[in-house]
């Protein structure tokens, strides 16, 4: 009863909000939801509603009860979208602002494409895509956001989370440290405990690979990883570049050296098959994603392990995600990590194919992709986009301390971390 | 007119709130404000009100207008305090929780007192004080929170802020870097640009000292620093330990070595007097504070450069504080910085006399003081208190991603950075 | 004619010298040669003479002509031995002195047997053998000097010489450096040119292995190495421990890591098969020698590449040996190399099975073998023996500067490097 | 009696030798001694003879007895000189060979003059002088061999010897190590015992300075050093550049830093005055010598601590000199030390003013001086001269192993370290 009353009230509120945008019709509803950033054709939460709407006349006036039945499970989401109560209330303006940032970053022409394997070197260096997904599943994308690329090092935070979920923090960090190394990503140094410094450098990532799917056959381990990526992406299936995998494996002197050094130091669990582990690592690096799907993955981290497009399921525990974001904050950008933490302040992870995964906690996930890399291995346009983003919005964690309106805050007011300013 | 109406309305709200706690008397007002965490005798914002209250009968019933006249400038603050609208609405409970954390940390008996100069070694190792001050100026303290100690390395973030305010970010960072060093605090290493790695290691702190009060006489430079500490503390004057200063200067082989190496590398501005700069640095380290005053300093950083006890004045610019907090987050805890950032996640700075300055952005500043240090030079009880704090409250920056009530959130609901959880 | 006269004169001198020792008989000749340090049954130079002597009555008096015919090719050597003109004129006394040094070193009980592979750990730690061979082929041995052990790192100088002979100095040192590394023997560091620091650390030794027998089948390469060892030992065949080889290969994480790092840096010639090269290196380490045979190898180096037992053939060029001794002098004793060069000053190479190869240029070669190793991997008794040796004899290169008789000089006077002291 | 007979015999031999060169006259004697390399006007050993010869008619025939009386104390030296029994028997030819090497090295135009202080930068870069002095006091010089220059780092081996003589090996090496550092000369690194690596890098040289003249007043300490240099030079007084000293002291940031670091590590003896020690070090570096006088210093080391021009006095003990030469061999040429040891193999020490001190043990001392330095701080022409020297003569310690006449051996046959080659 009470629930029925709630639904009636929710229907009434949604209907009222819709009516404020024009006649309460299906076509108006579609337009209003798109304006709010919801991707109608590509959002699992809205799929049942769209199915039910097939027989509905687009321009027929809907009453509150009909609207409620049409929306059903999605009614809460739709009401909040219509009432501008999603995390980014004015998404139309936000999308325009992002588009200008995208255009600003597009003019960057510096950097070169990674070419240590031919598969990376052959890509068109001018490609550039950006996509975002908020913690409420609002989405926008620009440029080549649907082109697939290899995730490369962007697989490292995901593998770290999987290892944490399977073994717990204590066990994982008995094999790999959790501090910046002060060294390059493929450095031969180990920490004082003879461990790799953290899971986001090659050695640490290889150690995590040795922990995932313990006791499974190689095919099953990789299958497990692919399933997890699919869930993180809201159900969209990732690709795989076998050519990249074969090339990586063939040119991996440094990674083989790291593997042998780690075995010598006893980094791996007993009974680890070193060659199998390295091959598994190369396979994870060869997973293919688009910027759009990666933005959803990033938003899952921004929301503490729950995918905004499938919010009924917790993929990673909040503690797992907290640990992952902490390390992305301090160690995610190779040798640029310290500078990135200082000036951008957001957890991020870059990959050598040009991807950059960025998390704005409690707000959204982003992915930029552009193959030109700077000397430290980070995407030139990706870093430029992040700088412009933080110049425009108060997304740096220490940006909004006093609530003085120095920068744009696109968030719903009461979700802001800034207290209102009181002068007494 | 409109203003007078506002005052009348505010008086009415305050009167109503006070009446809910019992008869609306002065003595009830005092008790209620104390319960809200306001330190009546020691809060510059309430001083005029207390002066006016001298002639008022404690148990006489006050009407709204009289209450309004009594409070005058502080009326807004008092209304919010009575209405539980300060950043920590239930301060009584919060204080109790903190007290239990204080007691938990008190049992730690490990570590040893620094003894590289006799002045440090002579201190009673059992002393332990904790104080907090919220961004609304709510305060609590436990143990030896009024005992003075030398700030030592806790002067580094303040000096960095002063250098930034005087010269701007670009100039300051042409002399000192802004990344973790991966080394000890007094390490001889420099970054790739031949700069000290950051302003929170000795070399970088000395570089900052060379920038403060350019062109001033030594006495005036030090006076400038003391004035800034006083403002940061809400008007309370800091002390100075001349014995510590003389001892530091006499045993400073490493710092002299650092100074000469820096001069060789051209770290200093031209015309820097090296010996004078080093002496200035030792003087800054010998400033004395209590945990109570330091908590106010920390709260000023938590509020973006505005002291909660004197909110009409901006001491440091928000951007200055942002930069300072970023470096405290990544580099403030000597060799433990990476681990602290991972597990605690709060900007902090430790000093060798046992102080620990911690900032919970937008919430509060803390200071713990306990002379027993671990091997890395951090206060054993201070670190234990921080761990307990973050286990109890969702103060880790990535703690409250999904709004699941996993931990206590003591903050006023709409100031939380956690979105409410929406399951649709 | 002239030659016949020479032989007659030589026969006369030999006969005279023999007569001074007693009746000029075969048995007296045998005794006199043994006193001079010549190993009758085991010296290829004397084998034809011994064959001819089979029919000779031991105590029959020999005239000069008969003695000359008996000795034939060896007449020059025998004359010099009888006339005390070999490099160590008084070999009886020298052998006694060495025996006392051997006994002094025997009391050392420190150190532990290497046990990173079981084959090394199983050896009796109390074994101790010392052997010497002068540049004139005079020989003495003490203790377990005929027990076989694996040469391990003692193969490195020989492999370096072989690489030099095959490719020349310029080519070899385009792959490997020639300076002390300041690091441990299996260190991962490389020099400024991205080469291993020198051929006597693991990485450099592996690089040399890649250069030996270029283009040959694995079996032929190893056969080549074995032939060279045989020549260096005066014709005695070395052994091979297949168990050690298999164990080395199975536990060689560090060496595999080094190999991959070197391939990454382009240390190897093109078309090098990495795994094959590493296996070849492990095989070289598993060659077995006795202290007696190793002393002959060392004496070949002491004589600039000519084996004293087969002086008609130059095995290595003088320049090759000069380079090898220079590196043994500065880099042959792992982390103890600098200290050894300072206090002993002789080219040496130690191996982890307990062998120590020492060269006294122009005087003799030595080998000590004792499995107990110090922390730096050098044989405890071997180092003790070297110290005693240099305390007793003026073998340090800067020992005999003024010709003051501060120490024993066992050498033939006019072969000494010390000028006679002139006081005007 | 027996002595008188000896003198008579010696006089007879000298007279016979002189007569073989022409009529036995004083003028012939002068010419013959000059041909043998003895510097008549500048050799303390010949001074009494020259004094007695003042009244002698140059072309009058001398009989043996008169010759003996004339020579008196120097008779032994003169007989050996006339009989070609000095260490370099054919000195005329040797001088010609050296002159060609000098001319070869003169064509080098590379390198630049050190200019970290103006006094060094002002010197004419084209100057080049070479001088030698054999262990028998035979001398030759070429080019600017009489121009004074500051010894700079060439003071380090002498200071090390003085510290050894005053305190003994054990004490000195409780303050400073004795191995190559693998680092630059002014490096901040210390060895595992927290000592400077060796006495020939700046830190170690400063440590030695703290040990010399313990308890003396500054003026007396410096006087002591000057006296020792005078003795080492055969009685010639060294100069001092006060301008260089003042400049060195004023620009010595690195050395001050080293000094403070060393004090921090407890390198110095208790009661060391750091500033005084550093000033003493700068003074030692500012001593002035010419190539001619430095060659005599080097020859004193080549002869184990006895100056060839004053052979009745031992300035340093043989053991002291042995230690010094060992360290010059491994550490004397800054970062080029390893390569120099490999390819030249002679103990040497370079200074930043362009001097290079080289010792051919038991043969001679050399000094080259040319201000152009290579990137590692060594004199370009000095190193070129050394290379040419070792290409021409068998002076590399492992050059003459088999006695094969691959290179020139200018030494008196029976002083050679090479055994005659025996093919049986």
Image (spheres, coloured by chain):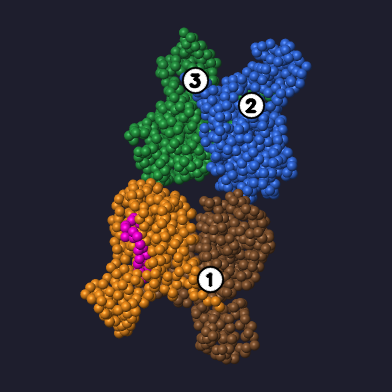
Chain colours: A green, B blue, C orange, D brown
The magenta span reads C131-159
Q: Disc 3 is attached to a residue of which chain?
A: B
Q: SS class of the residue under badge 1? A: loop
The residue to which callout 2 is attached is B141
Q: Is residue C220 left or right of A31 when viewed as pictured?
A: left
Q: Picture quarter containing residue C9?
A: bottom left
**Residue displayed at 58% across by 63% down:** D165
Q: Residues at marks 3 and 1, common chain? A: no
Q: Look at 45% across and 32% down and name the residue there.
A: A169
> From the image, which quarter does the C terminus of chain D lie in?
bottom left
2 or 3: tag closer to the N-terminus: 2
In this rendering, would B200 be left or right of C409? right
Query: Which residue in the protein does label 1 denote?
Result: D303
Chain of the residue under label 1: D
State whether discs 2 and 1 lie on one chain.
no
Say which of marks 2 and 3 sits in front. 2
Q: Nearer the viewer, residue A10 or C64?
A: C64
Sort mark 2 into few (<14), some (14-19) or many (20+) by Cα contacts within 10 Å.
Answer: many
At x 71%, y 21%, the residue is B74
Q: Residues within 10 Å of mark 3 (few under 14, many from 20)?
A: some
- Chain under numbered label 2: B
Q: Residue furthest right?
A: B55
Could one spot residue D252 in this view of the protein?
Answer: yes
- The residue beneath circle 3 is B422
Give the secondary structure at mark 3.
loop
Nearest the eye: B274 or D116:
B274
């Amino acid at each position: 009863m009470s629930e029925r009353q709630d639904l009636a009230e929710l229907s009434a509120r949604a209907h009222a909000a819709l009516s404020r945008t024009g006649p309460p019709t299906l076509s108006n509803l579609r337009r209003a939801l798109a304006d709010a950033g919801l991707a109608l054709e590509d959002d699992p939460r809205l799929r049942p509603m769209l199915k039910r709407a097939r027989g509905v006349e687009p321009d027929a006036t809907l009453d509150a009860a009909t609207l409620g039945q049409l929306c059903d499970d999605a009614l809460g989401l739709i009401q909040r979208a219509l009432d501008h109560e999603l995390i980014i209330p004015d998404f139309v303006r936000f999308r325009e602002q992002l588009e200008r940032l995208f255009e600003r970053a597009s003019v960057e022409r510096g950097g070169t494409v990674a070419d240590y394997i031919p598969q990376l070197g052959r890509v068109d260096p001018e490609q550039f895509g950006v996509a975002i997904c908020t913690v409420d599943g609002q989405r926008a994308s620009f440029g080549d956001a649907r082109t697939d690329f290899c995730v490369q090092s962007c697989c490292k935070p995901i593998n770290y989370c999987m290892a944490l979920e399977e073994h717990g923090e204590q066990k994982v960090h008995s094999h790999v440290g959790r501090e910046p190394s002060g060294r390059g990503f493929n450095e031969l140094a180990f920490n004082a405990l003879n461990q790799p410094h953290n899971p986001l450098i090659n050695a640490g990532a290889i150690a995590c690979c040795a922990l995932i799917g313990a006791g499974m056959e190689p095919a099953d381990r990789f299958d497990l990883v692919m399933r997890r990526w699919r869930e993180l992406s809201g159900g969209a299936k990732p690709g795989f570049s076998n050519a990249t995998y074969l090339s990586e494996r063939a040119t991996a002197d440094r990674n083989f050296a790291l593997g042998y050094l780690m075995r010598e130091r006893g980094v791996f669990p007993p009974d680890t098959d070193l060659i199998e582990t390295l091959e598994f690592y190369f396979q994870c690096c060869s997973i293919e994603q688009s910027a759009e799907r990666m933005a959803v993955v990033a938003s899952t981290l921004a929301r503490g392990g729950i995918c905004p497009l499938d919010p009924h399921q917790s993929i990673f525990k909040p503690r797992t995600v907290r640990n992952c974001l902490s390390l992305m904050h301090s160690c995610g950008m190779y040798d640029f990590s310290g500078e990135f933490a200082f000036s951008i302040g957001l957890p991020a992870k870059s990959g050598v194919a040009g991807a950059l995964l960025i998390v704005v906690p409690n707000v959204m996930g982003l992915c930029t992709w552009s193959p030109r890399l700077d000397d430290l291995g980070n995407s030139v346009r990706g870093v430029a986009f992040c700088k412009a983003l933080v110049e425009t919005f108060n997304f740096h964690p220490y940006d909004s301390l006093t609530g003085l309106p120095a920068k744009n805050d696109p968030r719903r007011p009461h979700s802001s971390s800034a207290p209102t300013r009181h002068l007494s």
